[in-house]
Amino acid sequence: MDLSNLKPAAGSVKNNNKRVGRGQGSGKGGTSTRGHKGAKSRSGYSKKIGFEGGQMPLQRRVPKFGFKNINRKEYQGINLDTLQKLVDEGKIQDTVDLDVILSTRLAGKNDLVKILGRGELKAKLKVSAHKFTATAKAAIEAAGGEAVTL
């Protein structure tokens, strides 16, 4: 074995790329396998996503509807039965404010909190939140508690 008969291992070297655009003698010159004229023959061509050959694309044919209100305020809802469950477990005693809600992980620190009226509340609680539904407020006051809007 010497330098004159060194070869790479069988199958390790693959070079079957077409060498297009290298003159007429190569058999792949001229139009360089791109055919004649049209967008696909030009340099820099890339098909746009959703392009249908000039036909009106589906995305533009289908009617649009609805709208997104950019000023919408998103509230994190907490139901009365959730508060009652926390009272039963001994996690809250007499007041429910944002600190308690954060510590029990019912809402995040940047969330606006709304108390909703599902379930029933037996405990007397002073609840502080950004909003209350009418049924929730009535249920809290019926149980002898207080609903404080922040």
Image: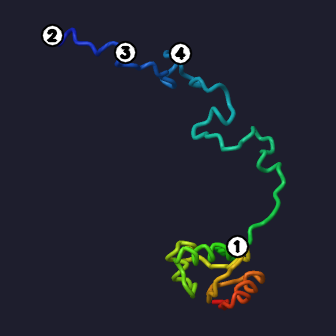
Q: Is residue 39 visible?
A: yes
Label 4 to label 3: alpha-carbon separation: 26 Å
Q: Which residue is mark 3?
A: 11
Query: Image quadrant of residue 67?
Result: bottom right
Residue at left offset 53%, top offset 81%: 100
Whether 78 is drawn above or below 23: the answer is: below
Q: The residue tagged with tag 4: helix, strand or loop?
A: loop
By what rule are the colours in the image chosen? rainbow
Q: Earlier in the sequence, mark 4 or mark 2?
A: 2
Q: The residue tagged with tag 1: helix, strand or loop?
A: loop
Whether 84 is drawn above or below 40: the answer is: below
Residue contact at pointers 4 and 2, CB within 8 angstroms: no
> Which of label 2 and label 1 is nearer to you?
1
Amino acid type, residue under disc 2 in the picture: Asp
Query: Image quadrant of residue 101?
Result: bottom right
Amino acid type, residue under disc 1 in the picture: Ile
Whether 105 is drawn above or below 56: the answer is: below
Label 3 to label 2: alpha-carbon separation: 21 Å
Label 2 to label 1: alpha-carbon separation: 76 Å
Residue at left offset 64%, top offset 33%: 40
Q: Residues within 10 Å of mark 4 (few under 14, many from 20)?
A: few
Residue contact at pointers 4 and 3, CB within 8 angstroms: no
Q: Residues within 10 Å of mark 2 (few under 14, many from 20)?
A: few
Amino acid type, residue under disc 3 in the picture: Gly
> Which of label 1 and label 3 is nearer to you?
1
Q: Is 70 or 144 nearer to us in this picture?
A: 144
Q: Which residue is mark 1?
A: 70
Residue 86 at x, y percent in the picture: 57, 75
Q: Which residue is mark 2?
A: 2
